[in-house]
Amino acid sequence: MKNKFKLPGLLSLKTYLLVFPIGFLSLISCTEKYELKQPDVRLWYNQPAKVWEEALPVGNGRLGAMVFGQPFAERIQVNEESLWAGQPINNNNPDALGSLDELRTLLFQEKSIEAQRLVELNFLGTPPRIRSYQPAGNIFLIRDSTAKVDDYYRDLMLENGIATVKYSLNKTKYTQEVFASAPDNVIAIHIVSEGNEGIDLQISLKREKDASVQIENNQIVLTGQIIDEPDPLTGPGGKHMKFASLLNVDQKGGTLIRDGNCLRVEGSSEVTLLYTVSTDYNINSLNFDRSINPLKVCKDIIEEAERKSYNQLKMDHIKDHASIFNRVFMHLGKNEISNLPTDQRIKALKEAKVDPDLAALYFQFGRYLLMGSSRKPGKLPANLQGVWNYQYKAPWNADFHTNINLQMNYWPAEVANIPEALIPLSNFMDKLMVPGGKTAKEMYGARGWTFHHLTDPFGRTGVMDGPWGLTPMDGPWMTFPLFRHYEFTMDTVYLNQIYPILKGSLLFGLDFLTQSPEGYLVSNPSHSPENRYFLPDGERATLTYASTTDIQVLTALFNNFLIASEVLGKDPDLSNEVKDALKKFPPIKVGQNGTIQEWFYDYDEPEPGHRHMSHLLGLYPLNQMSSGSPELFEAARNTIEYRLSHGGGHTGWSRAWIINLYARLFDGNKAWEHLHLLLAKSTQNNLFDTHPPFQIDGNFGGTAGIAEMLLQSQGGFINLLPALPEKWPDGYVKGLRARGGFCIDMKWENNKLINVVVYSDYLNHCNLKYQDSLYEFDTKKDFKYEFDGNLNLFNENAIHR
Ligand code: FUC
């Protein structure tokens, strides 16, 4: 197989940075005009949302809102990413390190039940749980009317990020627009009326817990502080996160009056509400920071935003939003079902109808959700619900779950061209190195850092939930989205920034590894996320040593580190140590039933259809089981089939993973089948992924899967249409990204590629592959290359950025 993409020459890092002075944002778009157009990217309905899961999300990376579109009792449920219950607690079990040797001995002797008891006593975190991400509240717009609603329509236009509601009452037309502006850091709500009757609304801002509301002139001011009750599972009680929110009301015509703790507009022709919310969370300390005054922050934001007219705010929002969203167009074919309202399209899919355009919409919705939940002005990564949550105790606390979910959130970031989504994640990981460093040292006597299967904004990194939470490899696993960002952008400044994170993870890995009785270097304790196996005596066990997923994670981490140290010219001695260690890892094995063996021994499992497929990490998102290793490749397919034949894929995120896995097996029709099932079985009418009620990882995994069907770039090749299903015979895509700093547009007809354009951000080498055709060429920086469907190059031009 050909070598990886080359860096431009053998420049020192310093020279390299001078030549390519970053860069990061200039790398991300293919700005050339191309004749392909953005298709209709709208979710739309003929009725308001009755429940939260039918409301439509807007988000700016920090703020989120769910718009119901109710004419008489409009509800706009609001969120702010850092509004969490809880507090920082070092929950590393102080007895862990002293018991580590004993635990390892028990596991090497297959005494897993005894090991489990020891873990419950001496490893489980104190306390073992975290508290929840919480809502900021609701904005209610109440209209005292019994008029009949005519011509109702609502939509969410993904291209401009505006949720619109239109209807008529007594022949007066009302239009409401809601968007979350990143440039102005507010949620804007705008209502206009056209007709004889004006706008009469009672406006309120409410939060059911820990908050009070005051009216100050034309503003509703909400201030509060989360009061946590003491709880042995989650930690001591107390007055924790402070927060404030502000709703500013402006109207044209009519009057604005105070109505108790609400404001009331009467007879106005236009109303603009600007909303923001803030907390005293400080990511730098992973803690509250009492020097931050959330109300002052809100007042400053609103004061700035108020200087602009509504139209100016809207134009600035659209410009910003569209500059990211419109990097990618995707068209997969339309039919009559594609013209139905979104809820009816989902219904049609449940009745086994085919609607290729819904897959394209789902893909674009995933991109929309990622840019709405993980970018500046936000500072935290997308949690299990992005930023959108209405519950005070959300499912799984809407936490940062790191045994597949947070990783999956970032699968589409690079290929689907939202690389800035990585910035909050990278920063958060950087901060987590502090508590993670304590966990590495206090629990495992190791250098570097790690954490286990979940964390919160306060950086709790001990073992959570139960013995199955003893997953020290989840820290290393979380470095992959960061390294992937480098692989796609070739941004060495970024690589330099994340180098301490990679190195810290590597040092942890090196110190954590221990010699097995067979002479391998292995992880111990180890576990295959949330799955169990039968011990030879029939007992069900969780813990073990050298689970397959751990070997894959460590192999990838170590190899990524070798690339980083070489590119940056750092730590050559450490690299040698890493190369030696890699030679001592156990191999990935194929078990008796022809599947990838999940554990070091070929155990049977009580739940063969388990939702986690951790031992297939090597197939996707990693690249350790490719067609270059036919035995593993085949065993990977058997593994999926085995899981599926026992009821696997029953959660949205699990189904989404299967799409990606089949795409990596180049089986487009199977990938399509599972995409269809994801849409038909695990998707709400507002296109939110279900893990009832909502978990966003399935949206992101599904989005990545659709991209993976059309373009793959692992292993040194840019593989075009590697898993194109028969159901998508004609289509085009613009702006997908490939590893090496490339951007791809392509068009296909009758299931055959007819045209492809490669945009190159660097001097580089490109191996372009389509079915059996291969075209290898050296690219110039900022050049585009046009090919026909047989990969004949017919045009080459400089791109003028
Ligand atoms: C993983 C999954 C669960 C759930 C939780 C948030 O642990 O096994 O299904 O998605 O994350």
Image (tube, grey):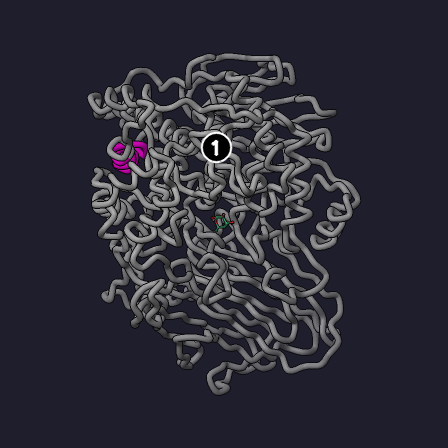
The answer to whether residue 499 is magenta is: yes
Q: Residue at x 26, y 36 (%)?
A: 508
Q: Is residue 667 above or below residue 63?
A: above
Q: Please check the rendered image and state whether residue 544 is part of the magenta-colored stretch, yes or no.
A: no
Q: Is residue 322 left or right of residue 459?
A: right
Magenta portion: prevailing SS class = helix
The relative height of residue 304 versus residue 737 in the rendered view (above or below) is below
- Expressed as whole percent of the image width and height from the top left, the position of residue 423 reads 37, 43
Q: x%, y% of residue 653?
A: 55, 45
Is residue 563 something one can see in this rendering? no
Residue at 53% x, 44% y: name it: 700
Q: Position of residue 289 (x, y in %)?
A: 25, 63
- Secondary element under disc 1, as helix, strand or loop, is loop
What amino acid type is highlighted by mark number 1? Glu
Query: In the rendered view, does 456 fall on the left or right side of 273?
Result: left
Which quadrant of the view contains residue 286?
bottom left
The residue most toward the bottom is 260
Q: Which residues are magenta?
A: 493-508
Label 1 packing within 10 angstroms: few (<14), some (14-19), many (20+): many
Q: Nearer the viewer, residue 523 or 207?
A: 523
At which x and y percent is residue 170?
Answer: 74, 77
The residue beneath circle 1 is: 598
Q: Which residue ends up furthest to the right in the rendered image?
A: 336
Q: Looking at the figure, which quarter contains the C terminus?
A: top left
Relative horizontal placement of residue 652, taking residue 337 as reference (left or right)? left
